[in-house]
Image (tube, rainbow, N blue to C red):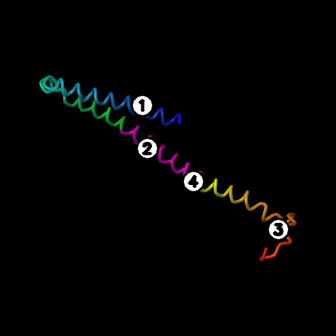
Amino acid sequence: RRPTGRFTVSEQRLEGEFRFVNARLITHSEEVAFYGGNEREREVIDSSFTRLIKLIRESQQFRFAMGVVDKQIAAYLATSLGFSLMARAFMDPANTHIANANLSE
């Protein structure tokens, strides 16, 4: 499905961004500590992580909702439609063969 693909692409992009920010901090940790940039780096990492978590939550909620809808349609709607189509011949009062039948037939 199209929205699921978009979620996956966005999730991979944000994961890559978070990994990059984390690796950059690890690489330059001495300079960050020396110049007192820890609060700024924390804001950058927290912002990247928050965007990633928000997207993952939206993605999981969408996938759960689609799973519920798909299960309901597949299980109940299709079954109800099948039963109603099959029962139509038996419930039709204009069907003389079944209307005149008794229990032994």
Q: Nearer the viewer, residue 2 or 62?
A: 2
Q: Amino acid at mark 2?
A: Gln
Residue 46 rendering spot, x and y as whole percentages: 29, 35
Q: Give the residue pinned by disc 3.
A: 98
The Cα–Cα distance between marks 4 and 2, rounded to whole angstroms, is 18 Å
- Element carrying mark 3: helix
Q: In terms of secondary structure, where does tag 1 sit?
A: helix
The crowding category of the residue bearing disc 3, from other C-alpha atoms within 10 Å (few below 14, some 14 to 19, many at least 20), is some
**Cα distance in 3D space between marks 1 and 2:** 13 Å
Q: Position of residue 24 (x, y in %)?
A: 23, 25
Q: Is residue 36 left or right of residue 96?
A: left
Bin the neighbour count of mark 2 within 10 Å (Cα to Cα): few under 14, some 14-19, many 20 and up.
few
What residue did someone put label 1 on?
A: 10
Mark nearer the viewer, 3 or 2: 3
Residue at the spot of label 2? 60
Numbered badge on residue 72 = 4
Q: Nearer the viewer, mark 3 or mark 1?
A: 3
Label 3–label 2 contact, CB within 8 A = no
